[in-house]
Image (cartoon, grey):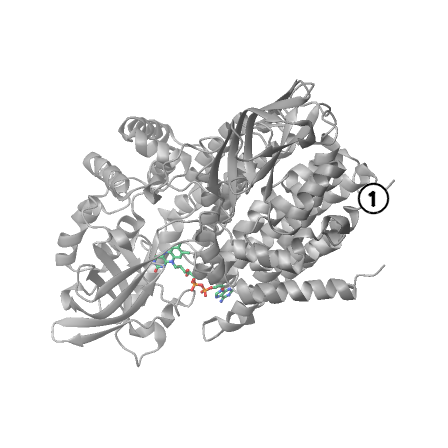
Amino acid sequence: MDFDLSEEQQLLKDSIERLLAAHYDFEARKRYAATPEGFSREMWARYAELGLLGLPFEEKYGGFGGGPVETMIVMEAFGQALVLEPYLATVVLSGGLVQRGADEALKADVLPRIAEGRLFLAFAHAERQARYDLANVAATARKDGSAWVVSGEKSLVLHGDSADRLIVSARTAGGPRDRGGIGLFLVDARAPGVLRRGYRTQDGLRAAEVALQDVRVEPQGVIGDPEGGLPLIERAVETAIAALCAEAVGAMGAMHAQTVEYLKTRKQFGVPIGSFQTLQHRAVDMFVALEQARSMAMFAAMMAQEDDAAERARAVSAAKVQIGRSGKFVGQQAIQLHGGVGMTMELKVGHYFKRVTMIDLMFGDADHHLSKLAEAGGLIAA
Amino acid sequence: MDLRFTEEEKAFRQEVRAFFHTALPANIRRKMEEGRSLAKEDIVTWQRILNAKGWAVPAWPKEYGGTGWSPMKQYIFLDEMQQAPAPQPLQFGVNMVGPVIYTFGSEAQKQRFLPRIRNLDDWWCQGFSEPGAGSDLAALKTSAKRDGDHYVVNGQKTWTTLAQYADWIFCLVRTDPAAKKQEGISFLLIDMKSPGITVRPIQTFDGGREINEVFFDDVRVPVENLVGQENKGWDYAKFLLGNERVGIARVGVSKQRIRRIRELAALETDGGRPLIENPRFREKLAAVEVELKALEMTQLRVVAAEGKRERGKPDPASSILKLKGSEIQQATTELLLEVIGPYALPYQPEPEEGWNEPPIGPDYAGPIAPLYFNWRKTSIYGGSNEIQKNIIAKAILGL
Ligand SMILES: Cc1cc2nc3c(=O)[nH]c(=O)nc-3n(C[C@H](O)[C@H](O)[C@H](O)COP(=O)(O)OP(=O)(O)OC[C@H]3O[C@@H](n4cnc5c(N)ncnc54)[C@H](O)[C@@H]3O)c2cc1C
């Protein structure tokens, strides 16, 4: 077992952190967030230059063949800087679906352009009634000759408003909650019949509601087995959860560091408030929660590569539970220990807290994954 | 010991409930139920309805417009008002400066201010905290120097809730810089229209606009606006903060929130069934209800003892009410957040912020994440929960 980063991994980490230190302070982030798209295309080009946008793809598609550890490194740095760009939507989720599910031609068409920063994708999967159930898909795809015709309403599509193309899940067979009968279709986001309504999210990112009416998809645009898309979706979501865990750890680490710094500098009663033992212990509890979360983010990264689907799912759920709980505790206490100033929009801490709160509610909150894990028999083998 | 309400108290509860049922304007009730923020007019409208009924300031002595109700009846009134759910009367006038004025103020101050507080003709705000004086309130620096029949005030207050609406601010100011820090403080009433006052808004991280900074630059305040004696302001402030803590438990608010959680959890589906049928969720909700019932009983113990205490001397147990009250309120906002789950994500600000789009997801989701974020304040203000624990350790446990 080796917890140390390899030389290349350390290089990757250093270069991302350097890039973000130069271009992603809190003021810069505010500017990026205030644009209509809610992020910086310039930063996106810089990520492409650094090779981040093709990181998980094979070399023949312009990628670097990186694994979950590389994604973890990127996402943790993104969490620290509260990055707004659609990395999760385009590279991790959509790129992941294409890489694992699409045929050669589609991969060769899509992946290099993602890697070069020329194509934005979003995964249009969730629906109003689905909550956290990935198999709950009511949108439909019916066959019309060799093509498919997709209709339905997709909700909470991360960065769906700026995407060039959408990967839409739709039901090709079966009932609304069946595991079988779900297909994945690559749709031009500006095609006739696609209606998008973009909005800001609580954490300052963007999402969209997407309505599709009789949108034609040629056979080349089908990703994987049109009746067997769910395992692909589950896998992509697990990878995304592992990535989000790392992002949350980045955000938590920053919140914790800022809080400790504040305890050292803020004075009340003539002394730094960090001299009060109760606050010292609170900062320690936050630290413990952070390190437990970090460990589980590493566990999730490692297990995201696991081939046994059941084991992989259990591990990812366990990590999501820990991240949700640690994120809530660290976030709430970071605000609390800052007192009044912690409640302000001007301080970064509140923004981290909003981000970790939203991460908990994405792809299943801590309780959802706890139930899932318990039903699957827990983690420790009998 | 008899823990039942008397027949008279039960009848009283029915009476106030019926009144709230008919008198509370529907649009205000809706905003309250949905957890939206209220406009100034909402709070004014409601206060005037209460005042017309003679119920604006139940806790005040009868001669100043109080009802003469027993502490238990006052509690029942508050409980029903919170469950209605109706807006809490503006604390800064009714529960803070009003009692200070009728207890320590001059006859002229009583005549001038008390009727206008009852009818919310004057909107008051609280100028205690400063950038360098939060938990350590006595470290405040805003100064007031005597100049003929005026004080000249210089300095800065911060976190001043709803100062943007305020006609008046009551301030703790330093009148004797040489004295020990608690002994050089005075309690001044300052007209917000005075030249030299600047209000600068501070946005909270949920997007809300309720707090402000207030700057004083050579603000001239007539000496007649000093409350009580010069340099005795700290005593009045302690009296005021004791009153604040009782109101802060908000048991009725949490009861109403729990009903709301149940209602919304019946509308959201989880794994094909209503979320409210999920045993894990139900147990979490029940656990909060147990905590709340315990808090209510503790509150009732404090209320029952109140009639027997020396007037104006708050029970140190009121720190328990603040502590648990804020934790329980925060727990209810966490459960609300959990109910709407993924639909916490869209940022759907209030129409006043210029957002008039149809709702994304269920129409009840919009205000919930901001409510959860905003409610973190309840363990910070009114004496943070850490400070409450210090008080309990010292005053009750003798540590
Ligand atoms: C939304 C909001 C509205 C407010 N409205 C008003 C208002 O209208 N008028 C007004 O005057 N004030 C108002 N306040 C101010 C509020 O009373 C102060 O924020 C509070 O007293 C804490 O002070 P501080 O913010 O300076 O934090 P600090 O005192 O700096 O505290 C920072 C942290 O240190 C902890 N701490 C401090 N001292 C100790 C100690 N001795 N032992 C252990 N822990 C300690 C605190 O609990 C907190 O966690 C408001 C605050 C908020 C958030």
Residue A48 lies in quadrant: bottom right
A312, A378: nearer the viewer:
A312
Reply above or below: A50 against B2: below
Q: Quadrant of the C terminus of chain A?
A: top right
Which chain is home to disc 1? A
Give the image quadrant in which the ligand numbered 1 is located.
bottom left
Q: Is residue B1 visible?
A: no
A129, A233: nearer the viewer:
A233
Q: Secondary structure at mark 1?
A: loop
Could you tell me the amino acid type at mark 1?
A: Ile
Residue A281 lies in quadrant: bottom right
Spot occupied by residue A340 in the image (x, y as percentages of width and height): 43, 59
Residue reaching furthest bottom? B178
Q: Quadrant of the N terminus of chain A?
A: bottom right
Spot occupied by residue A256 in the image (x, y as percentages of width and height): 59, 62
> Which residue position is annotated with label 1?
A380
B38 on left or right of B136 = left
Q: Residue at x 56, y 37 (%)?
A: A157
Q: Residue at x 51, y 58 (%)?
A: A349
Spot occupied by residue B318 in the image (x, y as percentages of width and height): 43, 52
Spot occupied by residue A180 in the image (x, y as percentages of width and height): 73, 24
A236, B298: nearer the viewer:
A236
B45, A136: nearer the viewer:
A136
Reply above or below: B319 against A159: below
